[in-house]
Image (cartoon, helix red, strand yellow):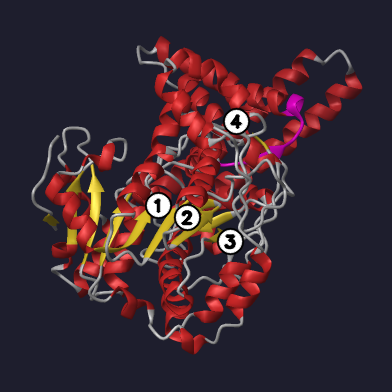
Amino acid sequence: MMEAPPIDTGASNIVATVSDSASSVEKQSEMPRESMHETIADFFRGRFVFVTGGTGFIGKVLIEKILRCCPEVAGVYVLMRPKKDRSPFQRGEDLCSCPIFKALRDAHPHFTEKVLVLSGDINEEDFGLHEDSLQRVVSDVSVVFHAAATVRFDEHLKQAVRMNLQGVQKLLHICRKMKKLKALVHVSTAYANCNRNHIEEIVYQPSVDPERLMELIDWLPDDAVQAMTPHLLKSMPNTYTFTKGLAEYYILKHGSDLPLAIVRPSIVGAAWKEPIPGWIDNCNGPSLLFIATGKGFLRSMIGEGSAVADVVPVDITVNLMIAAAWRTSQLAGTSGISELTVYNCTTGSVNPLRWVDIGNIVPNSFKKNPLELAWRRPNMSFTTNPLMYNYWTSVSHLLPAYITDMVLRLVGKKPRLVRTFNKIHKAAESLGYFTTNQWNWPGFNIAALMHEMHKGDQQTFYLDTRDLNWTSYLEDYCLGAKRFILHEDIDNLPRARQHLRRLQILRYVLNTVLIAMLWRFLVANSHLAGGLWYMVLNLVFKFVRFFRVTSSSR
């Protein structure tokens, strides 16, 4: 890995639409594949790539895929800022030592020489690049991937605007200076227009003009911005989706002279096939909820079980980004005209996964490959009834948490369960909007792209999710969370399974004791007491039988 020297430490709304999107897609689909003469690897050969957000989840997979499948790329400039006492160069070394680079390291041991770290920050003018570094980017780079963003749903609006909107403004300013620019791919989100049910592959007009908002953010104090945030968001659920929609509109309005593409992934999940099945390195999106389910903390959630949970694997997202850069350049080279193309990167229209499926598959996966020291056996259910949700969270979450914390206090340990549950509930409630609603995203532009790709590229940069088996994918996802987020050793699975069996035995014992106590207090009603007594005996019989089976299996 190399550090690119030198290093510096230091109005009115305009209606926005992509003109006649459907007819444009039809014309592009009719273009013969032979006109796209270059393969994707050919396109990247000898060219420099610039990546923002390279240390993020998508960014890591993107860099690995480019270096492994386009080995003759000249180099990848990666914008990084100092973080937690780690310099950009040290963070670059951390990036290249990530487990997902193992296959690349085996095939190309010197790949780090093509990872060129640039010290900078997207919040600063010209990304805070040193003058010489900026000049190298401007003179060298042919392809830009903009994946840097704040993905926190509860981010302060001022910070979300600075990262997700003003970052795009600064990027366009830099790209306009690039002498060799062939493609600029901006990573948005399929939920950038989630106040609509049917979302076409076009850019929609937002309710607020981005430039006016940026002016407002610059001079208003933080508390004033926070107070007016609900009024600005209107029907948008959070500052993330709101600012992503504004960024798309700003790109359409100010980037018409650039070769542009927008990729809109839905809920980006663990890797499907590459670089490692099930690889995941963060707790964004559903990952935290999966882990909380595996630990036995989360057992009930607000959500419509029959609604589509539009999860898209990270490798599909990255393959689309790379292929979209290739197609953007090829279309501009063929027609001589740069036209913004939007790609809805979703799975629900071709291979739907529903929340009820997640509620069944994820707990079963963690029962098969349990997490270490789980608090309870995994279980998960979705409900749209607020009363039922509050009941189950009180009885199944908070009450056991308070009892556990009380016991911890009595034995002189620090209570932690209630605080943990509050964090989990906050994360689950932030996803409530997405688990209770459903959207339709047509994917005509991806279909056109797949049609135009060379046969070999269709296999290397696969985009077809119709044969994605959700059960095996989610099992890999859960195992990946165990390995790569919690860093639990797979060799300890027998011990974790034994712990889960003990929890099941404990559950039978506690239920038996509870039933016995109820029978004791209701003994005055002989008919009811008799029924309860038979229930107690049945539970005891099940417990004894389970204990014998468990003992014999050892």
Residue assigned mark 2: 477
Single out the mark in the foreground, 3 or 4. 4
Residue 443, position in %: x, y?
A: 62, 65
Single out the mark in the foreground, 1 or 2. 1
Residue 538, position in %: x, y?
A: 74, 38
In-front residue for pair 24/74: 24
Disc 1 + disc 2, Cβ < 8 Å? yes
- Residue 124 vs 355, above or below: the answer is above
Name the kind of residue labelled 4 in the image.
Glu
Measured Cα–Cα span from mark 1 to mark 3: 17 Å
Disc 1 + disc 3, Cβ < 8 Å? no
Residue 410, position in %: x, y?
A: 42, 10
Residue 471's disc is 3
Q: Secondary structure at mark 3?
A: helix
Name the N-terminal-most of marks 4 and 1.
Answer: 1
Residue assigned mark 4: 429
The magenta stretch is: 378-388
Residue 280's disc is 1
- Residue 341 vs 355, above or below: the answer is below
Single out the mark in the foreground, 1 or 3. 1
In-front residue for pair 113/236: 236
Name the kind of residue labelled 3 in the image.
Thr
